[in-house]
Image (spheres, rainbow, N blue to C red):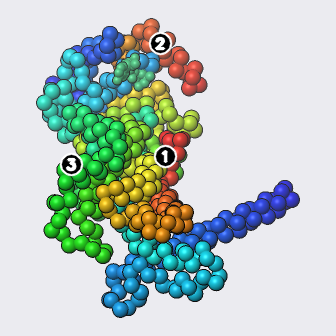
Amino acid sequence: MSDHDPLLAVESVSKRYGDERVLNDVSFTMDRGDVTVMMGPSGSGKSTLLRCVNRLTDVDSGEIRLGDHRVTDPGIDVDALRRDVGMVFQDINLFTHLTALKNVTLGLREVRGFSKDDAREAATEQLERVGLGDQLDSYPGELSGGQKQRVGIARALAMEPDLLLFDEPTSALDPELVGEVTAVMADLAAGGMTMLVVTHEKGFAREAATDALFLDAGSIAERGPPAQLFENPENERTAEFLDRVSTVSGEP
Amino acid sequence: MSETGATRTTADTGRVVSGSLGRWLTIAGGVLFWGWLLARWLNNWLLPAGVGVPPGESFLDPAAVAPISDSLAFAVEYLPQLADAAWLTVVLTVVSIALGFVLAVPVSVARVYGTYSSTVSLAFTELIRGTPLLAQLFVLYYALNLSTLFRGLPDGGVLPSAVVYVAIIGFTINSVAYQAEYIRSALLSVDREQLTAARAIGLSQRQGIRHVVLPQALRFAIPGWSNELVYLIKYSSLAAFITVPELFNVARSIAADNFAYTGIFALVAVLYLGLVISASKLMAGVERRVAIPGLGSTTSQ
Ligand SMILES: Nc1ncnc2c1ncn2[C@@H]1O[C@H](COP(=O)(O)OP(=O)(O)OP(=O)(O)O)[C@@H](O)[C@H]1O
Ligand SMILES: [Mg+2]
């Protein structure tokens, strides 16, 4: 494909929990600036794959590299790796006891060693970037789901990661709040951020993704540009699944 | 619409008035109780000799209130000695719960997140919670003869004597075990994904526990902690059995002299009650003060 090293390389990754093969010989690469969406039925291993990339989960076999990090080497410094990969969660998982601002400054202070003032300034900037400059001192309990998820994005962005992972960032949100989050994500994509996004938002995928993957039972069943994958899926399972998602989200 | 609005306003006003009356009574009672206790302690230890009244003697002359009521005269006569003894009860409780807290945090963290240290922590808490507090005090005092360690220290008056240090050690060890249990279950009730989120931005496990899990867990632990404080106030009376002259011990010896067991222990009960109510009010205040919107309510994000 290309003659340079990709930013992310996933090679023949397999993972099982007990007898269940959750990931089965998964390989793909992403270049800097790529926005890859990953779709697939519940239980197909999407979250597991993301968690392998920032080593919240260990692979059984195969190899993952991210820039200079040999992610799957047992001896690597996982904290250093995680400084370079951000993650946005389905359940958002904001630090419940901290204000929006403090959610963002914590990593800046403790991981990146910013001074108090620098951290405050950088965090404010990130929160303004996701449209929450007026909610700096709100606690998560005082924010709407969409606002919380945008804080979650700002928290990940503040670490200036090379790659941002999104695990169904909008599926816990009320439908009317999805748009404000996908808009922020589309902005990031347009700004050149490298993103690996598990989502069933076809609108976002069409608009912002360079690439779509369809994961089925732990294997990549199909990969291609989003438009092609959605319009003319080659794989029968892909077609069936996309049909179902469309019915749910009311898309044609 | 306007009618129901008016009714509700009246009802609310009624509740507000009776609520604030109760609050004022509580505050007045608290000020009276603590004002008097602090005045006693100041009088005993901080005023130069010759100023104020001698320790153990009341500010009022019991004979002067005798015409009003005999019980009142009895209270005026004996409360001062009991107030002086309550000082040690407060010292034992406050010092032990504070030291116990400082130690209980690492013990509970070890229990939840440690491997080898988890077993040690479990063994310690089970041993301490599984044996009587009085037996623990006896081991420290009689078997290990710990008070000899503190012989050289100055004592008397505001400073506690050697045996008080032994009691503090005993209560602290005991309190570590109980507080560690409260904090342990609080740690477990923090959503696991909070630590995952901390790790995902590059915090180490230790940083994640310190900055994310503990601040939430300690808030969850406050009700248990209030319980422990109330228990400790009452259990501090066991120090009497290793000769500490705290509230219960002093009451017992006064009663042995004058045989007025009912009267003396009624006064003692009032003092303990005052301490316990103060402790609960204080902890409720702390809980309110550190409360965070949305944290601890059942509907989290
Ligand atoms: N920690 C774990 N222990 C045991 N089994 C697990 C664990 N995590 C995931 N699994 C199993 O692995 C399979 C894949 O899970 P995963 O969460 O990766 O799926 P997913 O594609 O993200 O699904 P969903 O769309 O429901 O989020 C599931 O069958 C799940 O039960
Ligand atoms: Mg998932």
Q: Which residue occupies 27% across, 74% down?
A: B156
Q: Which residue is rendered at x = 62% and y = 71% of the image? A: B25
Mark 1 belongs to chain = B
Q: Is residue A45 above or below residue B104?
A: above
Residue A176 in which image quadrant: top right
As measured in the structure, the alpha-carbon distance from the residue carrying label 1 to the one carrying label 3 is 45 Å
Residue A114 appears anywhere in the view: yes
Q: Position of residue A168 (x, y in %)?
A: 43, 30
Please report whichever mark, 1 or 3, sits nearer to the chain's N-terminal start: 3
**Please, what secondary structure does the residue beneath circle 3 have?**
helix
Identified by mark 3, the residue type is Ala
The residue identified by callout 1 is B296
Q: Nearer the viewer, mark 2 or mark 3?
A: 3
**Which quadrant of the rendered structure holds the N terminus of chain A?**
top left
| Residue extending farthest bottom | B50
Image vertical order of residue B209 relative to residue A61, above or below: below
Q: Give the farthest residue toward the top.
A: A236
Dot 2 corresponds to which residue? Answer: A239
Q: Going by the image, does A73 lie left or right of B69?
A: left
Please name whichever residue, B34 or B206, is drawn nearer the observer in this view of the structure.
Answer: B34
- CA–CA distance between discs 1 and 2? 44 Å
Q: Picture quarter containing residue A160?
A: top left
Question: Which label belongs to residue B143?
Answer: 3
